[in-house]
Image (tube, grey):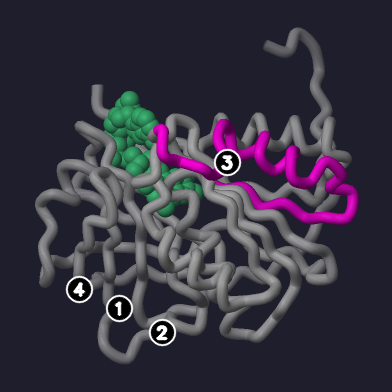
Amino acid sequence: MPDGPVEIAPPWIKERRQPERARYDVLVHKIEDRSKDVAVLHLRLPIGRRVPFSAGQYVTVMMAGGDSRNYSIANPPHLNDIVELHVRRVPGGKFSDRVLNSLQPGSMLDIELPFGLFSWSEDVSRPAILLATGTGFAPLKSMIRELIQNRVSRPVHLFWGGEREADIYDRTLVETWAKSLPWFSFTPVLASPDAAWAGATGFVQDAVLARYPNLSAHEVYACGNPVMIAHASKLLTERGALAADRFHSDAFVFSGQAES
Ligand SMILES: Cc1cc2nc3c(=O)[nH]c(=O)nc-3n(C[C@H](O)[C@H](O)[C@H](O)COP(=O)(O)OP(=O)(O)OC[C@H]3O[C@@H](n4cnc5c(N)ncnc54)[C@H](O)[C@@H]3O)c2cc1C
């Protein structure tokens, strides 16, 4: 707790033009179980509607009683008549358990979009390191697909962390990118792998530092677990020489009022 006056000075201020935000009733087109605890929701906007957004932004899903939850948009901005959401099922969670279990193809959801400032910086000249844990992959998927669509070929290395192999729930797609795109690399990182796992182990931020001990020329984008983001920010700036203003992040903190 501060015990005196506190001055908060942002290191930089940048004006960004926000796309226009709007609220829609969207159709649940498909619900895919990608792993034991990750569901991918495919939503369709009303016919003829397209919503401009930046890769990395999120939607707010409205729930009965005025509560709401945030979910990152996983589809790229050129596919803007649909919304793809990756939802990790939290046992007892109001949206990710109860509402999600009540949905089926044909159900409607009330969403507002787009929100958030997490997206590519304007400095496209630097190599980018992307860190995800779990469904933190969702906004990064949108951002990578945007680069593919725009034929931008800046070096990008995605490190995706989970407990076990099943947590890297879109691995086949990402490995396809790594094989076909010369500028894209992929390292899955498991904290509690099976004995057969031959890949990287431990925490995702440690795997980044082991591979890139000097990040002074890089930009980093981290998304998912707030604890990972706090540790990654400290580790990569203090030990990896990453400039603090080139660490971009979106922490998946609880976005609603948990019930008492
Ligand atoms: C900007 C932003 C983007 C987000 N994007 C995504 C996304 O793309 N995919 C995604 O899955 N989530 C995302 N989240 C988190 C999401 O908004 C919800 O907070 C989460 O799904 C839990 O909501 P719920 O209604 O299911 O659980 P709640 O009813 O809010 O929580 C029920 C209880 O579960 C526990 N709990 C809730 N969340 C967690 C958690 N993450 N880990 C452990 N325990 C928990 C708490 O004890 C809580 O009291 C994002 C959050 C933010 C702020």
SS for callout 1:
loop
- Which amino acid type corresponds to the residue marked 2 in the rendered image? Arg
From the viewer's perspective, tell me whether residue 172 is left or right of residue 188.
left
The N terminus, quarter of image: top right
Rendering quarter of residue 143: bottom right
- On the rendering, which quadrant does ligand 1 occupy? top left
Ligand 1 within 8 angstroms of badge 2 C-beta = no
Residue matched to label 2: 50
* Label 2 Cα crowd, 10 Å radius (few <14 / some 14-19 / many 20+): some
Q: Residues in magenta?
A: 195-223
Task: Look at discs 2 and 4 and give the one toward the viewer.
Answer: 4
Label 2's element?
loop
Image position, residue 23 (x, y; %): 35, 68
Q: Residue 45's mark? A: 1
Residue at the disc numbered 4: 29
Depth check, front residue: 132 or 248: 132
192 w.r.t. 110: above or below: above
Between the residue at mark 1 and the residue at mark 2, the CA separation in whole angstroms equals 7 Å
Give the residue furthest to the top.
3
Q: Amino acid at mark 3?
A: Ala
Q: In front: 257, or 28?
A: 28
Q: For the point 57% across and 41% down, which residue is it?
A: 200
